[in-house]
Amino acid sequence: MSKWNSETLRVVIPDGATLGPSQYHDGKMILQVTGPEDLIRLIVVDLATGEPLGNVALIPESKA
């Protein structure tokens, strides 16, 4: 998903997705990504290593 490349952190998001707000806390970056059908996902990345720590999919109750 993400990887340090020289001085650039690469985070792969789905084609057609858009980025929302990002937050930084305790050496972590949390990116909000809105994908197809307006589904929202939070991507958590460790800024020290560039490794993804996890994803949180926010699913509407009607689709759960």
Image: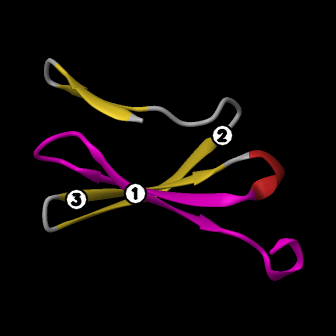
Magenta segment: does it hold 63?
yes
Q: Which mark is residue 17?
A: 2
| Left or right relative to 2: residue 19 | right
Position of 40 relative to 11 (above/below): below
For the residues bearing labels 1 and 2, Cβ distance under 8 angstroms: no
Q: Dot 2 lies on which element?
A: loop
* Residue located 42% across and 36% down the image: 1
The answer to whether any part of residue 9 appears in the image is no
Say which mark, if any, is on residue 28. 3
Vertical relation: 51 (above or below) 43: above
Q: Earlier in the sequence, mark 1 or mark 2?
A: 2
The image shows residue 49 at horizontal and vertical percentages of 14, 41
User: Is residue 27 visible in this depiction of the protein?
Assistant: yes
Q: Residue 33's x, y, as percent? A: 57, 51
Q: Which residue is mark 1?
A: 54
Numbered disc total: 3
